[in-house]
Image (cartoon, rainbow, N blue to C red):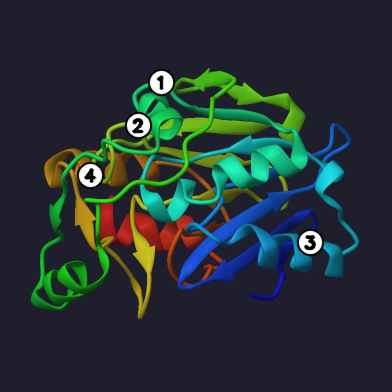
Amino acid sequence: MAAEQIVPGLYMFSTRAVNMFLIESPAGCTLIDTGLPGSAPNLLQELAAIGKQSRDIHHIILTHAHPDHIGSFAALKRETNARAYMHRLDTGIATAGRGFRPMTPAPGLRRRILFRLFVHLDTSVEGEMIDQSLEDGDRLDFADDLQVIHTPGHCAGQVCLLWRKNGGVLLAADACSNMGGLGWSLGYEDVEEGKRSLKKLSSLNFQSACFGHGKPIRELASVQFAKKWG
């Protein structure tokens, strides 16, 4: 896992095909998602490589309650003493570390096969308390004007985040993916709800997009979203 700067002030860290993000701001760093269980040591090592320490992380945002996004939440909250944020529909799962809602595969044979290979929700992770619930439309000033967009479908409490710096950066979580091209995530709790969320995202204006899984899109990202789901 090596840090990759997406735009000034935004870094991506990847481990075991899961992406996490760090936003720098005057109010302290904000970590977005925490990866699978056991990801904390590698993440802290990569933070050190860009000159950050655990005490620099003041906020943790969890985009949704799936094991690959909250797996190291408890460990990182202990290490950083950061304040944690999540949509109210998913806070109970993150606190308990279990009770993951079922999903079905996304359309397409390839995604059905990968879903069966890699998606495992009959598990548990270490739980930890969420300090503050997020709602659609919230503006998070501590992260330099980060806007919360509730995007259910993949997960009922999933949020995407629109950072208005550098021409606009969409942090799309698992509303979709960019693995071999912009497309569906592997699975959804409600695929029709997921389609509505993608249409919602396609109405926004942003230059870049980042994903929970796959490579970032660095230019004209909202144009690609609009062509595919607008």
Mark 2 and mark 4: span between their CA atoms?
12 Å
Mark 3 and mark 4: span between their CA atoms?
33 Å
Is 174 left, or right, of 188 in this rendering? Answer: right
Looking at the rendered image, the disc whose residue lies closer to the viewer, 3 or 4, is 3
The amino acid type, in three-letter code, at marker 1 is Arg
The amino acid type, in three-letter code, at marker 3 is Leu
Label 3 vs 1, first from the N-terminus: 3
Mark 2 and mark 1: span between their CA atoms?
7 Å
Task: Look at the numbered discs 2 and 1 and tell me whether their residues touch, using CB distance below 8 Å.
Answer: yes
Label 2 vs 3, first from the N-terminus: 3
Q: Quadrant of the N terminus?
A: bottom right
Residue placed under numbered mark 3 in the picture: 47
- Residue at 8% across / 76% down in the picture? 109
Label 2 vs 4, first from the N-terminus: 2
Label 3 vs 4, first from the N-terminus: 3
- Residue at 43% across / 65% down in the picture? 213
The amino acid type, in three-letter code, at marker 4 is Gly
Mark number for residue 112?
A: none
Residue placed under numbered mark 1 in the picture: 88
Label 3: which secondary element: helix
Mark number for residue 157?
A: 2
Residue placed under numbered mark 4 in the picture: 194
Foreground residue among 207 and 23:
23
Label 1: which secondary element: loop
Can the viewer see residue 44 in this picture?
A: yes
**10 Å neighbourhood of mark 3: few (<14), some, or many (≥20)?**
many
